[in-house]
Amino acid sequence: MIGGHAAEMLSRHGHEVVLGARKPPRQETPLTRFAVLTGDYATGGFTPHELEPFDAVVFAAGNDIRHIRHDADREEFWRTTQIDGVPNFVRRAKQAGVRRVVQIGSYYHQVMPHLAETNDYVRARKLADDGARALADKDFNVSTLNPPSIVGALPGVPAWRYETLVAWARGERPDIPDFAPAGGTNYMSVRSLSEAIAGALENAEPGKAYLIGDQNLRFNAFFQMIFDAVGSSRRVEERDEEHPLLPDAFIVPGRGNVLAYEPDPQETALLRYTRNDVVRAVREVVATVEVSR
């Protein structure tokens, strides 16, 4: 979803865009107009020879806790998809003569560094970030954007979580009580993230990690935005209980904690991304889901 939106925005900015993916995009999406280079970065795909034609690469393929199977070897999974997989891909881009790489990471290790000591996912993200940026030099500009929870959907691509949230807000899931778990986080629209990607390609400092974001919200306030967007008059309360649509395993800092911060204003201006865009993004996601129903 993030890579697709970034491709669309970069194309509008005048870039010639080629998608890198394990398989071609779905025919129902707007991405079919782009050329596709197929491969799997985690297993050595996208060789230096294949990357030679490109001036810049945006890496938005990092796996997270939603992608790991319950029976997987966690240590091997994170090594392959993050700790070694991301820096090795960036190294192949450098060998190819690519001049700029923007990696999309995650905010946890910049906002709460202590989590990298206790959470294997956060540790993997941190090491992937550090390893990729360590390859930067005067001829090779590598930067990382570390965003928060991203709000967005891509037409034609299943958005199971938002489809369930919209059905719940519409009263079609009476099995789910009207509450959210205690705690909260920062949210950012995919449009704002795509703008930051375009800004980083032009202005990012080599070897720099940028903590980006938009609006701090408690989980019940975010769920309430979805209820409001579908026209529901129901209110979402906060309870210190696990929620079926936001289980404890997905709340990395732990239920009841609030991961809140303000991005640096100078960095926001440098990257030229929009703030206060979450409500609009929620409405757009709800409209996208409802069209697909």
Image: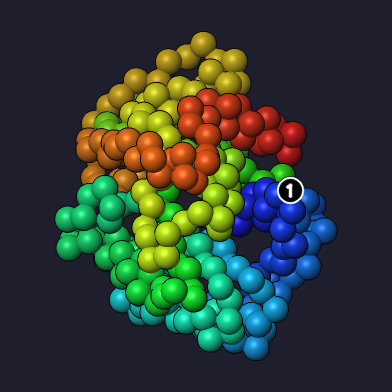
Front residue (pair 218, 14): 14
In the image, farthest residue toward the front: 138
Q: Is residue 187 visible?
A: no
Q: Residue at x 69, y 66 (%)?
A: 19
Q: Secondary structure at mark 1?
A: helix
**Can you say whether 31 is above or below 41 in the image?**
above
Q: Residue at x 64, y 31 (%)?
A: 284
Q: Residue at x 69, y 36 (%)?
A: 288
- Which of the 4 image quadrants contains residue 69? bottom left
Q: Residue at x 58, y 68 (%)?
A: 57
- Which of the 4 image quadrants contains residue 191? top right
In the image, farthest residue toward the top: 233
Percent coordinates x, y for residue 151 in the rendering? 52, 39
Q: Is residue 251 left or right of residue 12?
A: left
Answer few, some or many: residues within 10 Å of disc 1's Cα (few below 14, many 20 plus, some between 14 and 19): few
**Can you say whether 174 is above or below 15 in the image?**
above
Percent coordinates x, y for residue 154 in the rendering? 67, 46
Percent coordinates x, y for residue 1 in the rendering? 60, 52
Residue position marked by numbered label 1 in the rendering: 12
Front residue (pair 146, 77): 146
Specify the color scheme.
rainbow
Quadrant including the C terminus: top right
Q: Given the image, on which type of amino acid does mark 1 rest?
A: Arg
